[in-house]
Amino acid sequence: MAMLEIEGLNAWYGASHVLHGISLTVEPGEIVALVGRNGAGKTSTIRAVMGLMPKATGSVRFADTELLPLPAHARFGLGLAYVPEERRIVPGLTVRENLQLGLVASDGTIDERQAIDEIARSFPRLKERLDQQGVTMSGGEQQMLAIARAMIARPRMILLDEPSEGIMPILVEEMGVLFRRLRDEGTTLLLVEQNVEWALKLADRAVIIDQGEVVHRSSAAALLADKAIQERYCAV
């Protein structure tokens, strides 16, 4: 059974019809890269999965539960986590307090101290800054915090929107190591990314969206080797 199965997904911003029959699957324990040009519909797709689009129709099933009738908070409670492109680190809260927000969906079933200790081991840069206000950190450190906040409740699947954007290369490489480890430990990842080469080297499979439609599916390795398809659908 697929971890995530999207069939015939349409979505709108007001009168603007931005997704046109999107269909894709993500299997348990794999990384799928969702790539394409800016404005192609990648972010809208994962926002629709999370219940953050004004209007969406079709079917989105997560672990055999239909998501579209559910509010966003209920989707988090099923074991879905989301790292938005804009990070949304809460001003006025420390790193520790931002991490605590990530535990809200766990309904008290996860020991907070143990969970934060685990995050500190995975993110040594955050361990040094647990009592620092999150918004005072560098952009790369804030991105790590956003990912850590998504991880802390031990979700079954994480949706990531442009995690490498504006990040120093050394942190991007650290992020790649982390994502591989998460996959190897059983967490499923759907990765929206503009850095196509990096995403394809990480992912197991790739899906290209163009003008709100799926136009290509293949193994990530096959797309990495197919420069003509990359040029046609992903080049700026």
Image: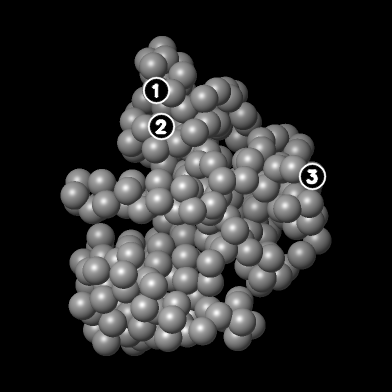
Q: Is residue 22 visible?
A: no
Q: Secondary structure at mark 1?
A: helix
Which quarter of the image is occupied by the N terminus?
Answer: top right
Tell me: 70 left or right of 51: right
Sequence-wise, the earlier of marks 3 and 2 is 3
Judging by the rendered image, the residue that carries numbered circle 2 is 200
Q: Secondary structure at mark 2?
A: helix
Which quarter of the image is occupied by the C terminus?
Answer: top left
- Above or below — where is 226 with respect to 50? above
Could you give the CA–CA distance between mark 2 and mark 1, rounded to whole angstroms? 6 Å
**Three-letter code for the amino acid on which mark 2 is drawn:** Leu
Dot 3: within a 10 Å radius of its alpha carbon, few (fewer than 14), some, or many (20 or more) residues? some
Judging by the rendered image, the residue that carries numbered circle 1 is 224
Comparing labels 3 and 2, the label whose residue is closer to the camera? 2
Tell me: 134 left or right of 5: left
**Three-letter code for the amino acid on which mark 3 is drawn:** Gly
Disc 2 and disc 1 in contact, CB within 8 angstroms: yes
**Three-letter code for the amino acid on which mark 1 is drawn:** Leu
User: Which residue appears at 75% of the width and 50% of the height?
Assistant: 61
Tell me: 220 left or right of 196: right
Tell me: 56 left or right of 83: right
Front-lying residue, 10 or 64: 64
The x, y position of residue 63, in whole percent, is: 73, 53
Dot 2: within a 10 Å radius of its alpha carbon, few (fewer than 14), some, or many (20 or more) residues? many
Q: Is residue 163 visible?
A: yes
Sequence-wise, the earlier of marks 2 and 1 is 2
Sequence-wise, the earlier of marks 1 and 3 is 3
Judging by the rendered image, the residue that carries numbered circle 3 is 58
User: Which residue appears at 61% of the width and 35% of the height?
Assistant: 212
Front-lying residue, 177 or 10: 177
The x, y position of residue 77, in whole percent, is: 66, 70
The x, y position of residue 207, in whole percent, is: 55, 31
